[in-house]
Amino acid sequence: MEFELIKSSHSVGEANYHHTFTPAYRRDIFADPAVRVLTRDYILSGARQHGITVAAMGFGPDHCHVFTAHAKNHSAAEVASILKGFSSRMMRKNHSELFKDKLWGTKFWTSGYFYRTVGAVNAETVRRYVSESQSKHWAKDTRQLKLLEFAVN
């Protein structure tokens, strides 16, 4: 993916973020492939609705990395709120039976998150990290589950 400056009528720049989201109580809900795929799809849908490009996404059993690009109209906090809020709402509304034994109440994600702003020089490095390096988390899982990756080229 080429990371070019975004030009609008009054600004020129870039806005790339690396976020890490953790499920409530740091449960390993992403060990279930269905939960990973559905969560990925809802994150992508929420991003698309707000004009945010998801350049890469990767899951460990108990966390999710999302690398977003071209989010010039949103702060890192807004991006986290949009992606976590929409995916949480949709997962709880439509698929709570998949994780009801691990999560309870109205929480899907923890209230916090990690974020880092990423410039063009580091964008490819972060994209590669998000899409390739999560296998170390699965090595701990005795079921040898595969990492679900999403990357846009």
Image (spheres, rainbow, N blue to C red):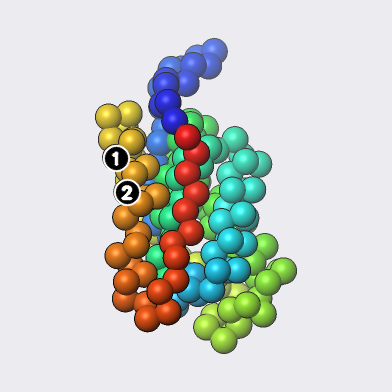
Q: Is residue 82 above or below residue 91?
A: above
| Kind of residue at disc 2 | Tyr
The answer to whether the residue labelled 1 contacts the one labelled 2, judged by CB atoms less than 8 Å apart, is yes
Query: Which residue position is annotated with label 2?
Result: 129
- Point out residue 88 in the picture as x, y percentages from the top left corner: 59, 64
Distance from disc 1 to disc 2, alpha carbons, whole Å, reads 6 Å
SS class of the residue under badge 2? Answer: helix
Looking at the image, which residue is at 34% across and 44% down?
A: 128
- Which quadrant is the N terminus positioned in? top left
Residue 121, by quadrant, is top left
Residue 140 drawn above or below residue 38: below
Q: Is 2 displayed left or right of 39 in the figure? A: left
Query: From the viewer's perspective, is 88 left or right of 69?
Result: right
Residue at 58% of width from left, 61% of height from top?
Answer: 37
Report x, y in % for residue 90. 67, 62
Residue at left offset 61%, top offset 54%: 41
- From the viewer's side, name the closer residue of 152 and 72: 152
Q: State the SS at label 1.
A: helix
- Kind of residue at badge 1: Thr
Up the image or down, 67 lies above or below 70; here it is: below
* Foreground of the two, 122 or 137: 137
Q: Is residue 64 above or below residue 77?
A: below
Residue at the extreme top: 9
Residue identified by numbered label 1: 125
